[in-house]
Image (spheres, grey):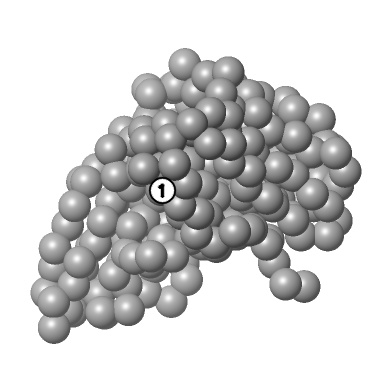
Amino acid sequence: DAGVIQSPRHEVTEMGQEVTLRCKPISGHNSLFWYRQTMMRGLELLIYFNNNVPIDDSGMPEDRFSAKMPNASFSTLKIQPSEPRDSAVYFCASSPQGYTEAFFGQGTRLTVV
Amino acid sequence: GQQVMQIPQYQHVQEGEDFTTYCNSSTTLSNIQWYKQRPGGHPVFLIQLVKSGEVKKQKRLTFQFGEAKKNSSLHITATQTTDVGTYFCLYNQAGTALIFGKGTTLSVSS
């Protein structure tokens, strides 16, 4: 298995533009997590899906952020409009079940200028 | 909600010295996981602890879960330069999702 696949690896965009981050979890895993990592705030959980259903989205910063999981093999995190303070590394992770070992993707480094 | 403190934030050691990082909670934890993130990399799972008083070893790494399930530690014996990185504890909050501690960044000089 190729592991959790995220795309793009790097994204540079201008303030106000829409950004879409993509994640393909490991096949057979039924839990998916989106995290954001910054120096100031560390690793923050944004949203958690179980069986494609959002279970906890309390970490989503504001209405500019949205996440979807249309099927078991794909998830997106969208920021619209993007702001410089959204600059961070965004990680997607999947696990066989919610509270077991989580496998992380390589991350997407987002820079909003 | 649960308050979990991870200490220290940073630790520098000479190669061969020991290293310990702690996660301390104000409430009882269901379980705790430990991850390592190398500079520029992504978090990688090390271990999960579930039982009160549990101790697990992986070569030079020793993981403990306190009797009250409110604290946990990761101890590295005789550090090597390959141990460099940030070590995170991860716990589930209110039975929903997984929350990371702030991490301890370890640097090792040879």
- Name the residue that disc number 1 marks: A111
Please give the name of the residue rendered at 55% of the width and 50% of the height, measured from the top-left corner. Answer: A91
Please give the name of the residue rendered at 32% of the width and 79% of the height, measured from the top-left corner. Answer: B82
Give the quadrant of residue B98. top right
Q: Position of residue B68 (x, y in %)?
A: 44, 31
Instruction: Classify the position of the C terminus of chain A by image quarter.
Output: top left
Give the quadrant of residue A32. top right
Please give the name of the residue rendered at 43% of the width and 76% of the height, measured from the top-left corner. Answer: B59
A84 or A38, which is in the foreground?
A84
Instruction: Classify the position of the N terminus of chain A by image quarter.
Output: bottom right
| Total tally of numbered discs in the picture | 1
B53 or B30, which is in the foreground?
B30
Please give the name of the residue rendered at 68% of the width and 50% of the height, measured from the top-left corner. Answer: A22
Asked whether residue B3 is in view, the answer is yes
B51 or A46, which is in the foreground?
A46
Q: Position of residue B41 (x, y in %)?
A: 44, 65
Give the quadrant of residue A79. top right
Q: Position of residue A83 (x, y in %)?
A: 42, 32
Chain letter of disc 1 in the image: A
B44 or A14, which is in the foreground?
A14
Q: In this rendering, is residue B40 above or below B49?
A: below
Q: Determine the secondary structure under disc 1.
A: strand
Q: In this rendering, is residue B80 above or below A96?
A: below
Residue A47 left/right relative to B68: right
* Residue kind at label 1, given as amino acid type: Thr
Residue A93 left/right relative to B47: right
Residue B88 left/right relative to B44: left
Q: Position of residue A14 (x, y in %)?
A: 44, 41
